[in-house]
Image: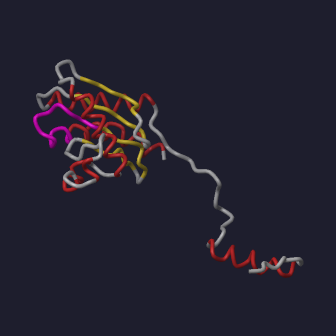
Amino acid sequence: MQIRKLTSVKAIVPVIGSLLWLSGPVQAEDSPSITVKRLTMESANTVALATVVACRKEGVQVTATVVDKNGIVQAVMRDTLAPTVSIDISRMKAYTAVNFSADTSALSSRADTTIGRIDGLVMSAGGAVINVGGTIYGAVGVSGAPSGETDEKCAKAGVAAIAEDLEMAD
């Protein structure tokens, strides 16, 4: 098979034009970078503390872990008598929630699937996405209460503690 050399600009322009057409429309406002909103250390600590305080009001001691959009831990608050194992479980719930962009209670049907068996994921109630105004900032995971529903109720209280500040900042 012989390959012809394109020797004129007139021969190259249609080829380039068809390649650009295949890649879709190019818009002037497209940027080569994005802006990512993240919680400050203070905001992450506020979520964690508000979560633990909400569970204390329920009569239980828990651990609350706040992760950023990438699932990296930003804050951990373990109440005095919360079980040690709650540290890892709360982190995994937060990690799972942010990676699936959903509260972990909504993922329970996937727990007994191939995805649900991946190390580091916990698909039981207690992880809540920090989603304010359509922006996901991270998630908070809670462990230590007698039920995942209580864990999640406390997590949502933690999110509520900063929701208004995040809405005002936008």
Identity of the residue drawn at 29% across and 46% down:
118
Which residue is drawn at the image coordinates 40% and 32% (left, top)?
A: 43
Q: Nearer the viewer, residue 47 or 86?
A: 86
- The relative height of residue 51 versus residue 95 in the rendered view (above or below) is above
Start and end of the magenta stretch?
A: 141-153
Query: Does the magenta segment cover residue 148?
Result: yes
Q: Quadrant of residue 130?
A: top left
- All told, the count of numbered labels is 0
**Which quarter of the picture shows residue 9?**
bottom right
Q: Nearer the viewer, residue 37 or 119?
A: 119
Q: Position of residue 125 (x, y in %)?
A: 20, 45
Q: Horizontal placement of 36 versus 87: left or right?
A: right
Q: Position of residue 1 (x, y in %)?
A: 74, 80
Q: Residue furthest front?
A: 1
Residue at the image position 80 percent from the left and 78 percent from the top: 13
Task: Give the image location of residue 76, x and y in percent.
Answer: 33, 27
Q: Coloured how? A: secondary structure
167 relative to 21 in the view: left or right = left
Residue ranking furthest to the top: 80
Q: Is residue 49 magenta?
A: no
Query: Residue 2 appears at what percent x and percent y?
Result: 78, 80
Q: Is residue 57 above or below residue 155?
A: above
